[in-house]
Image (cartoon, coloured by chain):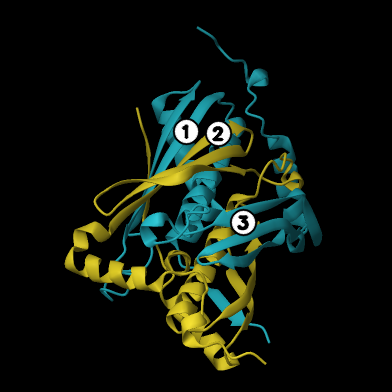
Chain colours: A cyan, B yellow
Amino acid sequence: MTMMTNGRVDNGVNVEALIGAREALTAAPEAAKFRWRARCRWMNGTHSRSTVDGFFGLGEDQRHRTEFSFEADHPEVFAAEDNGATPVEYVLVGLGACLTAGIAAVAQHRKIQLRSVQATLEGAMDLQGILGIDSDVRNGFDGIKVTYRIDADASPEEIRALVAQSQKRSAVYDIVTNPTNVTVEVDG
Amino acid sequence: MTMMTNGRVDNGVNVEALIGAREALTAAPEAAKFRWRARCRWMNGTHSRSTVDGFFGLGEDQRHRTEFSFEADHPEVFAAEDNGATPVEYVLVGLGACLTAGIAAVAQHRKIQLRSVQATLEGAMDLQGILGIDSDVRNGFDGIKVTYRIDADASPEEIRALVAQSQKRSAVYDIVTNPTNVTVEVDG
């Protein structure tokens, strides 16, 4: 039986720096206005390659340590080449990653040592929407179910509270559960 | 000046197969019920690794040709290690990929030859939301702007109509612009 002392809890999250950032941005709210970016280039068919290399924040352009590149495609059952994950699977990846990062940050703040955190995500979709068969069927997910398995030095109640707090502060959870305005323009 | 004949338009999308699928799924709507899946595993700090390897559709489990793996993390300005794109950037990738695949499919259906399609996506976010500084500020994007540059054998009006039709049928555009229910559970 191991008892972790508070000082030894280490989930790899620098909570002191985050608290410092919150104080700094409370004093300078303009610096809190971020703009996240991606570029997408059509390859062939339904295959595209997207890149992410930087964003705007803290009043200036910021670079990622390296450029990240992502292939997306439709699967073979849609008569496509399956050269990458489908676009809707990228949304599930973003949602799982956002909630999981939040769980680690909240656990660090609450001095709970995590040992393992795993999530499975499933989004149901009736293709009668995107195929235009039934206009009453939406194009997107009917709903998403996320199931966590978490091993941590905490009670089941504390673990459920961690997950709930992560939902409350999650950017992607908010984007998916609430409407977000999207404008699409053609240049030139 | 090149004139493409209809028979030579090739954007790499098998429109005949998609029309066949629409007919088949109209006759057997149960087969149109898909379930898309991802798994997410916490690595350390805000770093996670997600995998996508299969989904349910056409009445049975389907496998991707290969497993796709994605690293996500927070950037260095959040005192994190920047081991991957941020979760919200994954949402932009999914949105760009979905709209771009739709443009290619609609162009093929309308016998418009595409030469190049590029999109830039930008999502504005005020971090006062996720940092809990101001509860009136949402956690997610204030809004997303997508800008396309498209070179195709078509008039500007036809190109704008392509993009509009892709929005109308896009799963990720629907997910982002409309609310989707997300349930989060802890197993065990």
Up-down relation of residue A109 to residue B117 (above or below): above
Please tell me which residue is depicted at 17% across the width and 67% down the height of the picture: B27
The disc placed on residue A118 is 1
The disc placed on residue B42 is 2
Label 3 in the same subunit as label 1: no
How far is the residue under mark 3 from the one under mark 1? 21 Å
Q: Position of residue B168 (x, y in %)?
A: 42, 77
Please name whichever residue, A113 or B82, is drawn nearer the observer in this view of the structure: B82
How far is the residue under mark 2 from the one under mark 1? 6 Å
Q: Secondary structure at mark 2?
A: strand
Please name whichever residue, A77 or A170, is drawn nearer the observer in this view of the structure: A77
The disc placed on residue B89 is 3
Q: Are marks 3 and 2 in contact (CB under 8 Å)?
A: no
Q: Which chain does the residue under circle 2 lie in?
A: B
Find the residue positioned furthest to the right. A60
Residue A185, quarter of picture: bottom right
Q: Position of residue B141 (x, y in %)?
A: 58, 63
Up-down relation of residue A119 to residue A9 (above or below): below
Q: Are marks 2 and 1 in contact (CB under 8 Å)?
A: yes
Q: Position of residue A27 (x, y in %)?
A: 77, 56
Please tell me which residue is depicted at 46% across the width and 73% down the height of the picture: B105
Q: Secondary structure at mark 1?
A: strand
Work out whether mark 3 precedes mark 2 in sequence or the reverse, and give the earlier one: 2
Up-down relation of residue B103 to residue B171 (above or below): below
